Image: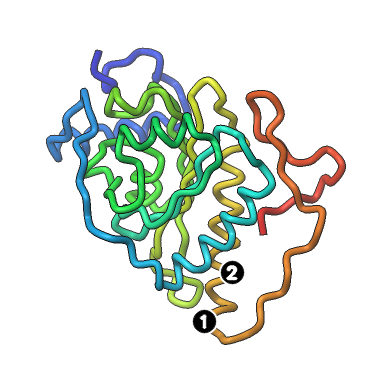
Amino acid sequence: MSPLSDPALVGRTAAPRLRASWRRSQGYGVPQDEVVPVFSGTPDTGSLLYECAHRVLTDLQATIPNEPVSLMVADSEGFVLARLGDDPDIRRSLDRVHLAPGFSYNERNAGTNGLGLSLADRAPSLVRAEDHYCTDLRGYTCAAAPVLEPVTGELAGSINLTTWSAASSGLLLGLAQTAANATSALMLVRAGGRAVRPAPRGEVFHVLGSHLAPDAGDPCVSAA
């Protein structure tokens, strides 16, 4: 069944954005049965976006070791710059669908997906299993949030968190937004030449069962 005619989507809050994305994906001629790899070259690991996002995602990853969550940063064209995560199964699985550094994951190349939608709409985006345009991606849930240039407000890229569809949680989008905001803030600090203040201790995220959740002992958590 084409996702454009899927009755399960009727009445869902995100449906209008998803439907618009699917129509764009169809217009681009994206195959629905597979992700066709589009390799864009070696990532620029010297950019300010990469430097700051990698710092933020490394700190976040340290709080959820061995959990099936992959953390990524992509530039404004959907080119994946870095991917972090300890779980070997999800790493191998994402390699098979080319969601890896060096590959492009914008809508034009991969159809509707969290990373691509966050860039196309410049808005936080949660794309669950059946929401993906390509069937290859329906085993995942992806949450992504745009990173904005802190001075100009221009789109710099996107932070994307991907997990198995069976382990999806609405909180995943909150984590992506927090990481994107922290990246933008760190870019402002680094661009201004000021020293980076160490992240406060105790700001820890847990993965409880199939849900990502803040540490129960600290109600005021942050990915910074």
Residue 23, located in which quarter of the rendered image? top left
Say few, some or many: other residues with alpha carbon within 10 Å of mark 1 (under 14 / 14 to 19 / 20 or more): few
Question: Is 81 displayed left or right of 169 in the figure?
Answer: left
Residue designated by label 1 = 191
Horizontally, residue 183 falls left or right of residue 75, namely right
Q: Residue furthest front?
A: 88
Furthest-right residue in this view = 217
Residue at horizontal 40 percent and vertical 73 percent from the top: 46
Residue type for callout 2:
Ala
**Residue 7 position within the rendered picture, expressed as x and y whole percent measured from the top left:** 35, 13
Give residue 161's position: percent from left, percent from top: 50, 42
x then y, percent, for residue 199: 73, 64
The C terminus, quarter of image: bottom right
Q: What residue is shown at x 50% (from left), y 41% (from top)?
A: 70
* Circle 2 SS class: helix
- Residue 217 or 55: which is nearer the viewer? 55
Residue 150: image tag: none
Which tag, 2 or 1, sits closer to the chain's start? 2
Is there CB contact under 8 Å for labels 2 and 1?
Answer: no
- How crowded pointer 2 is (Cα within 10 Å; few <14, some 14-19, many 20+) is rated as some
Q: Quadrant of the N terminus?
A: top left
Q: Is residue 186 left or right of residue 77?
A: right
Q: Which residue is mark 2?
A: 185
Q: Is residue 81 above or below residue 126?
A: below
For the rendered model, the colour scheme is rainbow
Observer-nearest residue: 18 or 174? 174
Q: Amino acid at mark 1?
A: Ala
* Residue 80 in the image, given as x and y percentages of width and height: 35, 53
Please, is residue 98 above or below residue 190 in the view?
A: above
Residue 223: quadrant of the picture: bottom right
